[in-house]
């Protein structure tokens, strides 16, 4: 079994770029933690069974460290909430939701009202305090500015111009699908290699310190030779699979460069 201290240090290193990607695209820690909890329960339930026995909530609780009550809740929520409905509800998103739906912050037509920054119960500050706890109103306003959700008027009032929280995404759904497949494959490969103790997977790593000129050359060669290597890898794979009626596996190669 891997030493938990070493595993924690490795995980922290891995999580930094992941946290950067999630924060850039508007996912809060709370949303991430809830999703991680659901995945822990699913993996414990599906992949850590005792042969010949039905996996119980009690065993899932022991494996994950969650209470049986929480295991039941997570499984129940997952059954009624498909992935497409997992919203990125950070604090700014909750403020927008309140502005759109709370009558205390609507005009006579039921639309989000123009709000002064500070003015008793019908102000942006009051809205933030009701829907975002102890978050500083100025910090929430800065985030809403960043995602182009509010308009500031000359009289100091604020208008909501976006009815949901959508950060400026720099990662397309297609790129996210690729990221998920590539990272899942990498981690599964490393874990399988370590657990089996056999050379069933190949992993390699090469990194050095480069000057800016050397980095430019590296980028150029990596693009050209990486494509050539992937073309060779495709030739290793059969054009048509003979797996019909047999146990099926998916195998592939992922290449990437990194800089830090």
Image (spheres, rainbow, N blue to C red):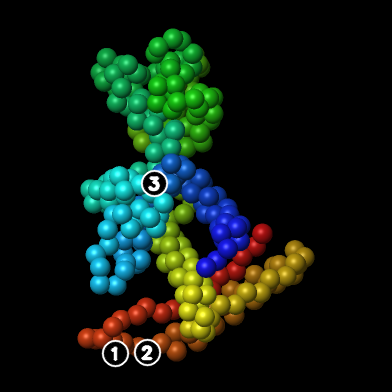
Query: Depth-wise, is mark 2 or mark 3 nearer the camera?
Result: 3
Distance from the alpha carbon under mark 1 to that under mark 2: 9 Å
Q: Who is closer to the viewer here, 29 or 71? A: 71
Marks 2/3: CA–CA distance: 40 Å
Residue 221 shown left or right of residue 157 in the figure: right
Q: Is residue 7 left or right of residue 92?
A: right
Which quadrant would the C terminus be assigned to in this image? bottom right
Secondary structure of residue under mark 2? loop
- The local secondary structure at tag 1 comes to loop
Binning the other alpha carbons within 10 Å of mark 3 as few (below 14), some (14 to 19) or many (20 upward) gives: few
Question: Residue 52, labelled with which disc?
Answer: none
State if disc 2 and disc 1 touch (CB < 8 Å). Answer: yes
In this rendering, does residue 84 appear at all?
no
Task: Tell me where residue 55 sits by quadrant.
Answer: bottom left
Q: Which mark is residue 34?
A: 3
Residue 15 position, x and y percent, is: 54, 54
Nearer mark to the viewer, of 1 and 2: 1
Circle 3: element type: helix
Badge 1 density bin: few <14, some 14–19, many ≥20, Cα 10 Å: few
What residue is at 73 percent from the left and 70 percent from the top?
Answer: 208
Residue 112, horizontal then vertical, whole percent = 34, 23
Q: Which mark is residue 242?
A: 1
| Residue plotted at (77% across, 65% down) | 211
- What residue sits right under mark 2 in the picture? 238
Q: Would residue 67 be visible to someone looking at this image? A: yes
Image marks 2 and 3: residues in contact by CB distance under 8 Å: no
């Amino acid at each position: 079994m891997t030493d938990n201290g070493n595993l924690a240090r490795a995980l922290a290193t891995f999580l930094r770029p992941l946290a950067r990607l999630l924060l850039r695209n508007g996912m809060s820690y709370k949303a991430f933690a809830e999703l991680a909890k659901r995945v822990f329960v699913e993996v414990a339930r599906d992949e850590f069974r005792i042969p010949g026995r039905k996996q119980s909530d009690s065993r899932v609780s022991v494996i994950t460290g969650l209470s049986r009550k929480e295991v039941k809740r997570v499984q129940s929520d997952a059954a009624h909430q498909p992935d497409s409905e997992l919203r990125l509800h950070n604090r700014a998103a909750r403020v927008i939701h309140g502005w759109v739906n709370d009558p205390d912050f609507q005009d006579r037509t039921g639309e989000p009202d123009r709000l002064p920054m500070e003015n008793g119960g019908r102000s942006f500050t009051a809205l933030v305090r009701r829907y975002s706890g102890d978050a500083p109103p100025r910090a929430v306003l800065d985030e809403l500015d960043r995602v182009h959700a509010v308009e500031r008027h000359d009289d100091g009032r604020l208008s909501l111009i976006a009815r949901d929280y959508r950060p400026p995404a720099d990662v397309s759904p297609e790129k996210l699908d690729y990221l998920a497949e590539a990272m899942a494959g990498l981690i599964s490969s490393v874990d399988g290699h370590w657990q089996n103790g056999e050379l069933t997977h190949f992993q390699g790593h090469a990194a050095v310190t480069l000057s800016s000129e050397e980095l430019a050359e590296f980028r150029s060669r990596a693009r050209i030779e990486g494509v050539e290597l992937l073309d060779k890898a495709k030739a290793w794979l059969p054009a048509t699979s003979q797996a019909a009626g047999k146990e099926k596996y998916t195998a592939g190669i992922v290449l990437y460069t990194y800089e830090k």
